[in-house]
Image (cartoon, grey):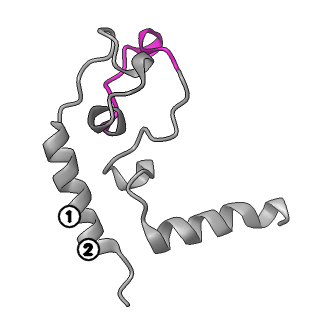
Amino acid sequence: MRSAWIETAEDLLINWFQPVWNHEMKVCYGFGKHGDSAGTRKNERSPWDTIHPGRPWATTAQNTPNKRSADDILKDIAAHLAKSLPKK
């Protein structure tokens, strides 16, 4: 695909499927993070790492816990999917 169409295709797919891991959806971002140090920005733990605490670099003491609990994030995911999945 020509590079000029990549962003257009990506935007179309994101708008159509509204994936929970897309940061714009604000539901469960953090899925695509790759080992950035928590100490670099002293960032808040992502929703993804809150419900999947398997990446040691994302759950250090330098990461502040996410404001939402894992249960709240899972409820938000369920609500998002209930309203966003394409109808058959």
Residue at the disc numbered 2: 83
Kind of residue sitting beneath label 2: Lys
Report the side of 10 relative to 3 (left or right). Answer: left
What segment is highlighted magenta in the picture?
Answer: 36-47
Residue located 28% across and 33% down the image: 50
Q: Secondary structure at mark 2?
A: helix
Tell me: residue 26, above or below residue 62. Answer: below
Q: Are marks 2 and 1 in contact (CB under 8 Å)?
A: yes
Q: Position of residue 60 (x, y in %)?
A: 34, 12
Tag on residue 33? none
Report the side of 23 relative to 45 (left or right). Answer: right
Residue at the far right in the pictured view: 2
Q: Secondary structure at mark 1?
A: helix
**Distance CA(mark 2)–CA(mark 1):** 6 Å
Q: Position of residue 40 (x, y in %)?
A: 47, 11
Residue at the disc numbered 1: 79
Q: Label 2 crowding class (10 Å Cα cut-off): few <14, some 14-19, many 20+?
A: few
Residue located 39% across and 81% down the image: 86
Report the side of 17 relative to 62 (left or right). Answer: right
Report the side of 14 relative to 21 (left or right). Answer: right
Quadrant that contains the N terminus? bottom right
The stretch drawn in magenta includes residue 44: yes
Q: Position of residue 20 (x, y in %)?
A: 38, 56
The stretch drawn in magenta includes residue 18: no
Kind of residue sitting beneath label 1: Ala
Q: Label 1 crowding class (10 Å Cα cut-off): few <14, some 14-19, many 20+?
A: few
Tell me: residue 42, above or below residue 4. Answer: above
Quadrant that contains the C terminus? bottom left
